[in-house]
Image (spheres, rainbow, N blue to C red):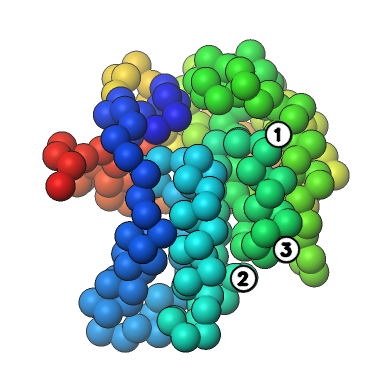
Amino acid sequence: AMGCTFCHTAKQGYKRNLTAGEITEQVIETQRGMPDPDRLTNIVLMGMGEPLKNYDAVITAINNLTDQNTISFSHRKITLSTSGIVPNIVRLGKDSPVNLAISLNAGDDETRDRIMPINRKYNLKSLIGACRAFPLPNRKMITFEYILIRGVNDSPADAVKVARLLRGIRAKINLIPMNPGPDPAMCAPSWDEMVRFQDILAENQYTVIIRKSKGQDILAACGQLSGRHLT
C-alpha cells in the first residue's frame, strides 16, 4: 500500500509481496473457472498494492503468462498500473512491452503531494518525464487514471492543469468517481461536474472516459479493496 488518502487498501498497511507463482496462478485459476476460457481477454496488474514495488516477481509473472507453454497471453492485452515509481517505469519500458497506466489524480504537485505521498519522492516532473520516454509503438497510448474527488481535484482549473501536463503524450484519460472510502469527507462530484471536467479535456484533444463504478455493494470498487484477514 502506498498511503494514498483516497484508497481503503492503504489503510491496512503492508503485509508482504505476492510471489511470481501466486500472481501467475491467480490468472490461470480465473481462466479455469470460466465457462469459456477465451473470454479472458485482458489482464490488469493493479488493485491492492503497487506492482512496481514488487518488480522482479511481476516481470517474472508477465513472462510466465506470455510464454507459449502456459496460456500464451499477448503482451498487448496486459496493462500494468502504477502510482509512479519512476525508476521502475524506466525499467519496465526496457524489459516488457506491456501497456502502462498511471494513477495520476492531480495536475499539480501541491495537490498530488497531499493525496499521494509517493509524489514527494517522485514528483510530476520526473513522472511525466518517464512517461514521455516510455516506448509507445504503433498507436499505443498511456492510460492516466484520475479519481475525481469533490473539492480536491475536480475543478475546471484542475482539468486545465491536467490538459497542460499531458500535452504531447499519447494519452487516454479514465475519470473515476470517488467511491466511498476511509474518509467520509472524500466523495465524488456531481455528474454534471464530472462531465464538465471531461469536456475540458476532450476540447484539448484527449480521449476521455468517465468510468462506471462497479462493486460498491461489496466494497470491491476502485479504492475499496481491503482484506479483513490474511490467509
Q: Nearer the viewer, mark 2 or mark 3?
A: 2
- Which amino acid type is marked by label 1? Leu
Calculate the distance from the C-alpha at mark 1 to the C-alpha at mark 2: 22 Å
| 44 versus 67 height, above or below | above
Q: Is residue 205 left or right of residue 210?
A: right
Q: Which residue is mark 1?
A: 127
Q: Which residue is mark 3?
A: 140
The spot of residue 221 in percent (x, y) is 32, 45
N-term mark: 2 or 3? 2
- Which amino acid type is marked by label 2? Arg
Q: Residues within 10 Å of mark 2 (few under 14, many from 20)?
A: few
Q: Is residue 91 left or right of residue 78?
A: right
For the point 40% across and 84% down, which residue is it?
A: 38
Calculate the distance from the C-alpha at mark 3 to the C-alpha at mark 1: 19 Å
For the point 47% across and 22% down, which residue is it?
A: 150
Which one is in front, 228 or 178? 228
For mark 2, give the secondary structure: helix
Q: Which residue is mark 2?
A: 76
Which one is in front, 28 or 162? 28
For the point 41% across and 59% down, which residue is it?
A: 20
Q: Which mark is residue 89?
A: none
